Image: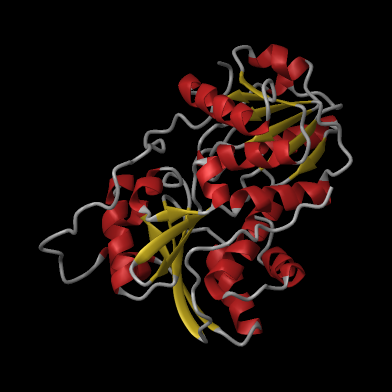
Amino acid sequence: MGYRGEGRGNREKHTRGGLGPKTKGREARSPLESAASATHTTISAPRESIAMKNPRRSSYRVGLIGAGIQASRTPSMHEHEAAEQGLHCEYKLIDLEKLQVGADALADLLEDAESRGYAGLNITYPCKQSVLGLLHDLSDDARAIGAVNTVLLSSGRRMGHNTDWWGFAESFRRGLQDVQKDSVVQLGAGGAGAAVAHAILTLGARKLTLFDLDASRAKNLASDLCARFGAGRALAGSDLAAAMATADGLIHATPTGMVKYPGLPLPAALLRPALWVAEIVYFPLETELLRVARRLGCRTMNGSGMAVFQAVEAFRLFTGITPDAERMQRHFASMGSA
């Protein structure tokens, strides 16, 4: 296809059929204990009716489930903002790689978090779609997008939300608001890709062409988007060079460019100065894609805004308190650009 994307070994998979069975004979040391020992146009934020609400509490515990997340800045953002709000937040990293398990361990990890009184969990690659079948209910946004990055745990029930789409939309609105969006190419149609595709069409993109190493995934996402936004608004691409030749902008929504997956997600020759380029990877902040694009003179947006604004909305869901978004941005920036 001409680009490197989400065809990694443990690609996200849908898991349906409700909650998994309780694991018997659990070791005395739980997966969460093991993970904890390893490390420490205006778009409005979603305000739909929430079936479950966490009561406000002065102290609470939350976590992040994903693979290769040791460099995540999310724990620090949540803990710092909680302290500024007069709260105590304990934010744990639950790293599948450190635990040497895959997404099939999600049922056990969710059960363990509930038993330990977690208020909620953030969910990242490769679990944003795998988690769907393990939840009792979904917000309207999460149901439409088909991916979850925030789970509320309350009274024995699990409520899934998607704050990624609003995080990307708010970042785009602030950084690339005035760009042309008649034709946009997006690389990646997984959990994060579904959210940013929803966001860019909400922001008014007229046509979105999707590419993924799993062609059926791009086709299925395009079909879902057309059902929500109208016929012809999204399509699965087959010729990346041709699509890029007529595109106004490029959105990159695969793991390529992360420290673990260095490199470019597409041939550099397909980039040109007139393009704008939006990245969702934020560690490092300047990926190889952004370096090449900036060198050519493209307008660019790094992944920091999406990282911050998805956390802003997740914080509100966890606590019932609207955080100071600018303060969270400043704290994110204080952690450096590496």
Tell me if 281 is positioned left or right of 8 in this view. Answer: right
Q: Position of residue 73 (x, y in %)?
A: 57, 62
Q: Position of residue 305 (x, y in %)?
A: 71, 54
Identified at 82% across, 52% down, the residue is: 42
Residue placed most toward the observer, 276 or 256: 276
Identified at 39% across, 49% down, the residue is: 131
Examine the image and state in which quarter residue 126 appears.
Answer: top left
Whether 108 is drawn above or below 16: the answer is below
Q: Does the rendering let one see residue 185?
A: yes
Whether 318 is drawn above or below 71: the answer is below
Residue placed most toward the observer, 229 or 4: 229
Q: Position of residue 155 (x, y in %)?
A: 36, 72
Residue placed most toward the observer, 30 or 295: 30
Tell me if 44 is positioned left or right of 313 in this view. Answer: right
Q: Does the rendering let one see residue 264?
A: no
Location of the C terminus by quadrant is bottom right
Identified at 36% across, 76% down, the residue is: 117
Identified at 41% across, 67% down, the residue is: 153
Whether 119 is drawn above or below 169: the answer is below
Q: Position of residue 141 (x, y in %)?
A: 58, 48
